[in-house]
Image (cartoon, helix red, strand yellow):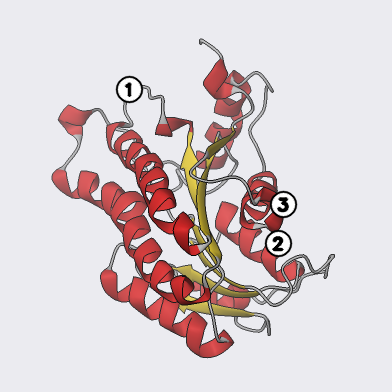
């Protein structure tokens, strides 16, 4: 399956972007949005379907890799620079979750979630910064959650990973801003994606229903989060540094 995108205003014309977890959900919507706005995109995912989704699009290069590995982080940045000459924007979107109380969770399950959302984010950010620093410009946007700050039973690994994401975002933002590179995160609420599909058949329906707990009374669509990502990556957010911008329908400001 190939895909095509209607060109928009060209806000990111000439920019080179890497998006992780790009085969579905927020990552797919984000890759499509950047491409529609004129960017050249490297779309990374562990799922080989990323080749089918983006393989026939001139402005998007698919890359199959495990974001939790150092080799994938190095190779995807090298691919962006070799193919397009530079790297301007990294979107760390790939994530995983399991709903289990800590006493029922295996070490492998814990490590998998931490490795994707925290270690993978660190590795990709490190390699991206190496490519951006010589240009003294760039932006990194990490996809967090209201779990960056809050939690509920059954998501200890996910909450730990998103808490780490928030602190990595803040720390790297301070290290990178001297080089003209801004790093921020989106604190996403419930979004109708395939995030839960690895362990429940009604994952999308569950997220849609759970989203009704937010003051806005619904879950988001991936495109709504992609728009926030694009803002943070753009010059419109030129004074935003080290922020976790909440896009959660008000979930984080209400007592349930």
**Mark sitting earlier along the chain (3/1):** 1
Q: Can you give x and y, in whole percent of width and height, for residue 50 in the image?
A: 53, 72
**Mark sitting earlier along the chain (3/2):** 2
Q: Which residue is mark 2?
A: 33
Q: Which residue is mark 3?
A: 236
Residue furthest out toward the bottom: 82
Could you tell me which secondary element the residue under label 2 belongs to? Answer: helix
Name the residue rendered at 48%, 70% in the picture. 44
Q: Is residue 22 visible?
A: no
Nearer to the camera, 212 or 256: 256
Tag 3–tag 2 contact (CB < 8 Å): no
Nearer to the camera, 172 or 1: 172
Could you tell me which secondary element the residue under label 1 belongs to? Answer: loop
Nearer to the camera, 168 or 76: 168
Q: Can you give x and y, in whole percent of width and height, for residue 131 in the image?
A: 44, 75
Find the distance from the CA under tag 3 to the CA under tag 2: 16 Å
Q: Choose mark 3 or mark 2, whichever is in front.
A: 3
**Mark sitting earlier along the chain (2/1):** 2
- Which image quadrant: the N terminus? bottom right
Q: Which residue is mark 1?
A: 153
């Amino acid at each position: 399956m190939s895909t095509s995108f209607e060109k928009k205003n060209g806000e990111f014309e000439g920019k080179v972007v890497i998006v992780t977890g790009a085969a579905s959900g927020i990552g797919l919507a984000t890759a499509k949005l950047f491409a529609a706005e004129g960017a050249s995109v490297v779309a990374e995912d562990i799922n080989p379907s990323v080749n089918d989704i983006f393989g026939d699009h001139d402005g998007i290069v698919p890359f199959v890799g495990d974001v939790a590995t150092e080799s994938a982080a190095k190779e995807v940045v090298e691919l962006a620079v070799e193919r397009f000459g530079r790297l301007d924007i990294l979107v760390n979107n790939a994530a995983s979750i399991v709903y289990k109380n800590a006493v029922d969770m295996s070490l492998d399950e814990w490590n998998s979630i931490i490795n994707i959302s925290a270690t993978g984010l660190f590795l990709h950010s490190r390699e991206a910064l190496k490519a951006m620093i010589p240009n003294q410009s760039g932006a990194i946007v990490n996809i967090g959650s209201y779990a960056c700050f809050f939690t509920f039973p059954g998501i200890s690994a996910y909450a730990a990973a998103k808490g780490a994401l928030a602190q990595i975002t803040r720390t790297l933002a301070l290290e990178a801003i001297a080089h003209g590179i801004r790093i921020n995160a989106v604190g996403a609420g419930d979004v109708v994606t395939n995030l839960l599909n690895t362990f429940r058949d009604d994952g999308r329906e569950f997220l849609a229903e759970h989203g009704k707990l937010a003051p806005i009374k619904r879950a988001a669509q991936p495109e709504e989060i992609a728009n926030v990502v694009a803002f943070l990556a753009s010059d419109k957010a030129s004074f935003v540094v080290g922020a976790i911008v909440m896009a959660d329908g008000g979930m984080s400001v209400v007592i349930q």
